[in-house]
Image (cartoon, helix red, strand yellow):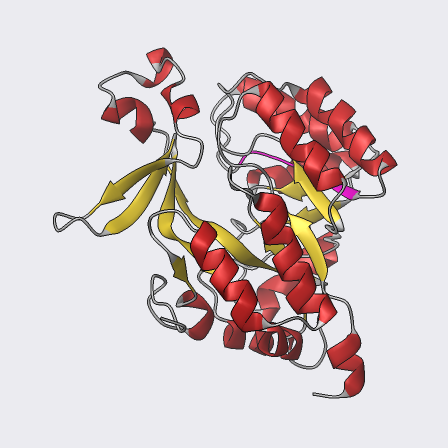
Amino acid sequence: MNSAARTKRIALTVGPQLYYWPRDTLMNFYAEVADSPADTVVLGEVVCSRRHEMKTPDWLALAKDLASAGKEVVLATQALIESEADLRTLRRIAEQGDFIVEAGDSSALNVVADTGARFMLGPHINVYSRAALVEYARLGALRWVPPVELSIAAIGDINRGGALLPTEVFAYGRMPLAFSARCFTARHHRLSKDQCEFRCRDDADGLLLSTSDGTPFLVLNGIQTQSAAQQCLIAEREALVGAGVERIRLSPASQRFATVIECFEGVMNGGESVEAALSTLDALSPLGGLADGFAHGRPGLEWSHA
């Protein structure tokens, strides 16, 4: 790797907060993020429209506060649009005009095209080839987040010959794997989706599922299914830069997330010890541990540093 690649800053993005936290908890979290080295913050409810602690005007107000603190702000849309109300919220986000919109799924693309919104591709937009990315670039996408299961080598293949769009990789956090119209958290509590009692608010980092032998496997987060293990690519700086990656995404967690940001900033942009950062992140990790299998083209729950 040449010296320019070694010294080029890798931007840090705080991804959308995927869980249902109380409003005060959420505001305190973003106050910490405002004082952190993070370059970009993605805001908005991307999982379930029934979560009502923050409404669109609240997200917009928070976006302006974070922009005033020097952060680039992106407004995310839901990954699963289920109703006319969801479509109205999507259109309002697309029409606001002040901030880039992250398209949660393909349904958002027509709306951003109609409104002329500046937009980027979220991790649930299926991009698995350079040809697909060419089409989205033609539509006006500003950058993209590859699907979490795409390996670093595959991302490098898509970017070979020069990145078509700035590339941001999901580098830390429980991996968002799937969405369903059914709310699995409500079902776990023997409740209907429409009478869920907002039970997902009880699980600050989702509801852990384990296999019959007690091994952490998946996490339920309302209509979203996540991995129990946390993706952690802090040791992959050289490979990421070699694959044309310019930005990494850190997915919020409830415990000491400011430390997570500091660890990634120190390793990615400060030349600090990978081993020391891994030790810190391992100690912070909830049940499920750390994983990097997808990044290496292997089963997602595997971990190279065990």
Q: Is residue 74 magenta?
A: yes
**In the image, residue 293 lies at what x, y percent?**
39, 68
Out of 252 and 42, give the one closest to the viewer. 252
Left or right, 175 with reference to 235: left
Residue located at (37% from left, 68% from top):
303
Residue located at (34% from left, 19% from top):
193
Query: What secondary structure predominates along the stretch shown in magenta?
Result: strand
What is the quadrant of residue 7 in the picture? bottom right
Q: Which quadrant does the N terminus fall into?
A: bottom right
Residue located at (65% from left, 68% from top):
267
Magenta residues (range): 72-78
Residue located at (48% from left, 34% from top):
80
Q: Is residue 224 above or below residue 124?
A: above
Q: Is residue 214 magenta?
A: no
What is the quadrant of residue 137 in the picture? bottom right
**In the image, residue 14 lies at what x, y percent?**
64, 46
Left or right, 271 with reference to 215: right
Residue furthest out toward the left: 212
What is the quadrant of residue 273 in the picture? bottom right
